[in-house]
Amino acid sequence: MVVNKISTPRARIVGGLVLTPTTSHPLPGTVHWTDDTLSDVTIGDEPATDLGGGTWATIEADGCWVLPGIVDLHGDAFERCLMPRGGVQFELDLALQENDAHLAGAGITTSFLSATDSWEPGLRSRPMLRLLVEALGRRSGENTVLLHVRHERCNTDDHDELMSWVTQGAVHLLSFNDHTPGGIAHITGLSASQIERAGVSRSELEERQRTAIERRTLGFEQEKDLADAAAAVGCRTASHDPSSTADLERDLRLGVRVAEFPESIGLAQAYLNEGIEVLLGAPNVVRGGSHLGNLSVRDALREQAGTLLCSDYHYPSLLQAPFLLLEAGIADPAGAWSLVSSTPAAAAGLADRGRLETGARADVIVVEPPSLGQQARLRAAISGGKLVWGSFAP
């Protein structure tokens, strides 16, 4: 994450309530890190290990919650940095810098940018994805902003190029999508937002869509190639908006690990029964329902029909949603926070983060819970041992 980082080799958070993998609720404790690794996480007053002498940069948590940094597997809000108004586009590196600040301010310490590989021109086109792959490649060594490619089944052009990105490790999560009539149940035609972001007339986009739909059968064949290539390099795969048992059967053949936004609670439970994680949207929790009229995430989680939350289109919702679930009695603090930290980290194969324990990556946030204010408020965020939001005590 490329923001104005404050780096110190030895730092700590004191005076807070710390949530560890062995506690269901945050308890008084301290967190120490050296470079990019947690060197001690202690419940109680005294560090569990000998940390030696010397000076520690300090964050005073003042009774706030000290939590693992948020891991977001699906976020496309970066598109608004790239195209803040329809047809108004900014240079990609500048857009990503702005997006870094949004992520830091939302407590997201690992972000998967969900970029659409579509048959549409413009914002969600293959040429735009190509630029994003190149831009992220220039950030060599960063492992906080990763690439989630949402591949549209009917986009069959340049298949070898996408295959090469997968096999070379440029893609960190690959999902299979079909945003056309006949692909996803609720889609019956073109939306105004599609036309605006594509930058072409409705008639031209309709013609492109008709041509794309004709390639759907080939797209199904290409999905199998992509799934096999992803499995060979350890890239996790997902499916988007499954709506039927036929979708589940297809996803089982593809070896999909995550189902994004199943369209019913029963289908979500069927995916879970097959050992496939179910990802749902945090904005749905915050708003109290789906903007598309789909399932209620709160209802799904009450029925234990979801295991992951993502930002979808609104980064700040990931910080607020666990507290709303806690307030509604749907989950305890550990269960609510696992939806945005340890479980998505594990689902993505990121074994080094998502929890506060010695030896883990130093991704930590300090949060003022809603009981102390109208909404949960981020006080500090540490990503890879570097302070990206907030300040150390003077």
Image (cartoon, grey):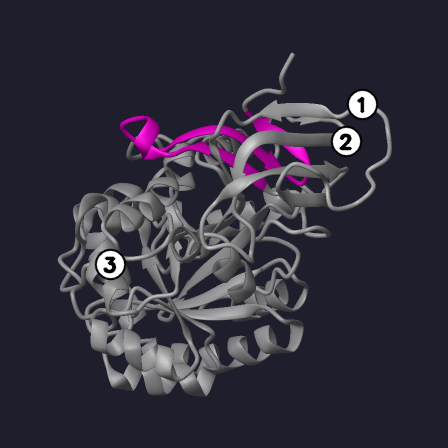
CA distance for labels 3 and 1: 46 Å
- Magenta stretch: residue 378 in it? yes
- Answer few, some or many: residues within 10 Å of disc 1's Cα (few below 14, many 20 plus, some between 14 and 19): few
**Residue indicated by mark 2:** 10
Give the number of the mark in front: 2 or 3: 2
Q: Is residue 148 left or right of residue 136?
A: left
Q: Secondary structure at mark 1?
A: loop
Nearer the N terminus, badge 2 or badge 3? 2
Q: Is residue 247 visible?
A: yes
What segment carries the magenta color? 364-389
Q: Is residue 214 left or right of residue 219?
A: left
The residue at the point 61 percent across, 53 percent down is: 353
Tell me the kind of residue under disc 2: Arg
Tell me the kind of residue under disc 1: Thr
Quadrant for the C terminus, please. top right
CA distance for labels 2 and 3: 40 Å
Could you tell me if the residues under marks 1 and 2 are in contact, i.e. CB atoms within 8 Å?
A: yes
Tell me the kind of residue under disc 3: Val
The residue at the point 64 percent across, 61 percent down is: 351
Which numbered tag is attached to residue 55?
1
